[in-house]
Image (tube, grey):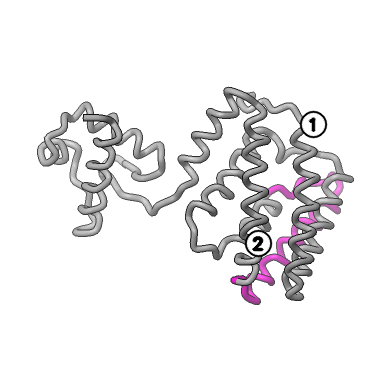
Amino acid sequence: MASNELLIILYSYLCQHAKENGKIPSITEMSDELGISVATLREQLEVTRALGIIESRPRKGIRLLPYSFKPAVVQSVTYAVALDDSNFQSYSDLRIQIENAYWYRSVCLLEEQDHQVLLEILDKAKHKLNRNPVQIPHLEHRNLHLTIYKKLDNPFVTGILEAYWDLYESIGLAVYTDLDYLSRVWSYHRRMVDSIISGEYWLGQKELMEHMDLLYKRIESKPIHLFE
């Protein structure tokens, strides 16, 4: 039986048991019910664990996790960047196009409390940039972008965007210390948020894409060392 066929059988089995009684049987029980050897099951369960489908804890057994596209994306892109640094540029370009394509749908879903969250993120970032020494508002950068797109009911879009920020940290872009660059980035963020709150979504999208151009040029100029 091919590996992908085994995974389909295993996923169907796990989902069925999770829906019926919320409990996943032990590996030995699964082996008996599915007619698959314990060794083969262990291999396939390692795949599902790496993909964020299950978690396994001592004395608590196996638990099915909510679906997330992010783990699969992170693993795949990490490998791609290890093969060729320029692959991160390609992935970054994909993320840019996705944010652009889903901009209007996303910002229209945001409510007043979401606007307030965005304003609080801006204030936190400003506070960090005004400190001596300066602190890099990376968490705020991540949270601002993900907050804008958080209400999309599309796990594949949000998975790609969430994975981008994990990888952004991995390659060291989160520790960039050029204050002029950071100030420009957060000026764009301020105008983006102001445009969202005022309902001038077209203007916010324009600021988004100009801000993305700054990032793209930065990635082009920065050597990537993923496994330092």
The type of residue carrying mark 2 is: Trp
Identify the residue under disc 1. Answer: 221
- Report the magenta residues as a range: 109-138
* Residue 152 placement (x, y as % from top left): 54, 63
Q: In this view of the protein, which residue sits in the foreground, 7 or 119?
A: 7
- N-terminal of the pair, mark 2 or mark 1, is 2
Q: Is residue 23 left or right of residue 166?
A: left
Asked if one can make out residue 137 in the rendered structure from this viewpoint, the answer is yes
Query: Crowding near pointer 1: few (<14 within 10 Å), some, many (20+)?
Result: few
- Circle 1 SS class: helix
Identify the residue under disc 2. Answer: 103
Q: Is residue 68 left or right of residue 134?
A: left
Query: Crowding near pointer 2: few (<14 within 10 Å), some, many (20+)?
Result: some
Residue visible at 32% across and 41% down in the picture: 56
* Residue 91 placement (x, y as % from top left): 62, 39
Our reading of the magenta stretch's main secondary structure is helix
Residue 227 falls in image quadrant: top right
Q: CA distance from mark 2 to mark 1?
A: 27 Å
Tag shown at residue 186? none
* Residue 140 placement (x, y as % from top left): 70, 54
Image quadrant holding the C terminus, namely top right
Residue visible at 67% across and 42% down in the picture: 93
| Residue 135 in the image: above or below residue 35 | below
Residue visible at 67% across and 29% down in the picture: 86
The type of residue carrying mark 1 is: Ser
Residue 179 falls in image quadrant: top right
- Circle 2 SS class: helix
